[in-house]
Image: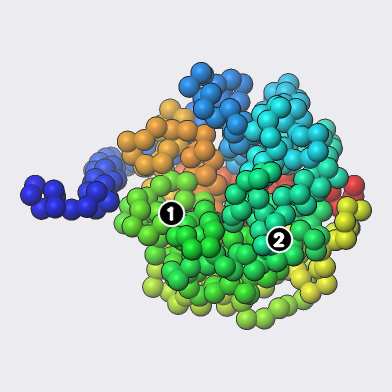
Amino acid sequence: MESFRSLTVTQRDQILVEQQAFDIFKTFYNLPPSSQSFMLELQRENHVEYLTKGLTGLGPSFCVLDANRPWICYWILHSIALLDEFVDPELEDNTIDFLSRCQGPNGGYAGGPGQMPHLATTYAAVNSLVTLGGDKALSSINREKLYMFLRQMKDASGGFRMHDGGEIDVRACYTAISVASLLNILDDELVQNVGNYILSCQTYEGGISGEPGSEAHGGYTFCGLATMILINEVDRLDLSSLTDWVVFRQGVEGGFQGRTNKLVDGCYSFWQGGIFALLKRLNSTKRVKPIPLGDGEGSGEESLQTTASSDAAGEEGLNEDLSLGGSHSEIGDQHNTSSQVNVIDIDHNHSKGHANVEPLFNSLALQQYILLCSQELNGGLRDKPGKSRDHYHTCYCLSGLSVCQRSWLEDEDSPPLPRAVLGPYSNLLEPIHPLYNVVLDRYWGAHEFFTKS
C-alpha cells in the first residue's frame, strides 16, 4: 500500500484501469463456452434501440450539448448505419429539416438553429446528410455558400479557423478539407499551405499535435494524416516515426490511448485504429498511376505486430490515388488532380493479389476490449469500465470495430474470414471509408450525387 501511495496519479489510475480490464477478462475466461459466446456478441438490437431513442429525444441533462446537436445526429446516424439499420422515413425527414435549420445564411452549419456556423458541426452535419443519403438530404446542402464559408475560415498560415475569430488547429484543417472533398468543391485556394501547417504540427514523437508546439494526440494524428492524404501531400510527413508512435499507443488492455502515458479510451479504437487503415494504403516512396475502382466491399489490413518495421506502413500500402476525382464542380477552380490517385480509391477495393502485410496492431485484442470492456449489454458503448455509455463512444467504438474486422483481408472483394471477426460472425459491421468515417455505400451515393451536380 505504501508503494502504491508513492506512485503518481497517472500511474495509480493506470493500475486501476488495468485491474478493471483484467478482472473482466479473467471472469470471461472462467465462464462456460455458452456464456463466453454471449459476452462476445454485439448486442445489435439493444444498440439500435439506444441510438434511435437518442435521435428522437434527449433528457434535460443533455442541454450542455446544445451547441453540438449535429454531432449527436452524426454519432447516432453513423452508428445505426454501421449496424446496417435505417431510421424510419419520418425521423429521417425531421433530421434533414433540423440540419437545414442549422445551416447558416452565409454557409456552414452551426451547433443548433440560430447559432454561429462552425467547422466541426459543419463536418458533422455533412456526414450526417451523407449517411442519410438520397436527393432530399444531399440537395439540402448549399455547396456554394458552404464553399464561401470555408474560404472565410481559411487563415494566412495555411490552416483554418474553427469559426469566425476562432482557434486555428488541425481539427479545422481536417473538417474543412474533408467536407470540401466529400462535396467535390476542393480547390487550390482551400489547399494552399495546408500541408505546411500540418507539417509544423508533427512532433518529435512522430504523432501530430493540434497546433505547433503541442503534444502528439491520436485524434489530431488521424486528422492530420487524413488531411495530408486528401491534399496529396502525405509524403511530406515522417510516416516512419508516425507509425512508430501510433503502434505503441495500444496498451496491455488491448485498446488504444490517445497520448503517451494516458489511459486507454474506447474512442481511440477509431482515432488510432483508423490510422492503420490509412497507413496500409500508402506508399511514401513513389507515386503510381490511378487504379480503377471496383464495386467490392472492404477495408484493409490494419494490423498486428508492434515489433514490425516502422517502414512497413509506408512501403506496403496500396499506392492509391487520393484526391477527389470525377467531374469538376463549378465552384472555384478544382484542386489539380493530374498527379494524384483518387480519394475514392482508398476504399480498399483493389488490394487483391497485393503482397501479404504483417499487421501493425493487435486487431483481436482491440475487438476484445471493445466487446468486453466498452460494450454495455443493454445498449451503447463507453470509454472504459466504470464509465457510462454515450453516443460519442458508441460511434467511435463501432467505427474502430469495423476497421478491426477487416484488418486481415487479403482479397478485398471478399468478406472477412470468420477468424478475423471476434465473436459470432453476426458481429460483422458495415465497412467504412476511412478518410471520412462514413459507411462505404453511403460515401458512394454521395460521390455519385456530387460529381453529377
**Could you tell me if residue 359 is visible in this image?**
no
Determine the residue positioned at 81% across, 38% down. Answer: 106
Is 304 on the left or on the right of 346, as rendered?
left
Secondary element at image label 2: loop
Secondary element at image label 1: loop
Distance from the alpha carbon under mark 1 to that under mark 2:
30 Å
Which disc, if any, is residue 289? Answer: none
Residue 40 screen position, x and y as percent: 40, 42
Determine the residue positioned at 62% across, 81% down. Answer: 285
Is 226 on the left or on the right of 449, as rendered?
left
* Residue marked by disc 2: 156
Q: Residues within 10 Å of mark 1 (few under 14, many from 20)?
A: many
Residue 6 screen position, x and y as percent: 14, 52
Residue 72 placement: quadrant: top right
Residue type marked 1: Gly
Q: Residues within 10 Å of mark 2 (few under 14, many from 20)?
A: few
Seen from this angle, which residue lies furthest left? 2
Residue type marked 2: Ala
Q: Who is closer to the viewer here, 73 or 294?
A: 73
Q: Who is closer to the viewer here, 371 or 204?
A: 204
Determine the residue positioned at 52% across, 38% down. Answer: 392
Residue 237 screen position, x and y as percent: 58, 72
Seen from this angle, which residue lies furthest bottom? 285
* Residue marked by disc 1: 258
Please say which color scheme the image uses: rainbow
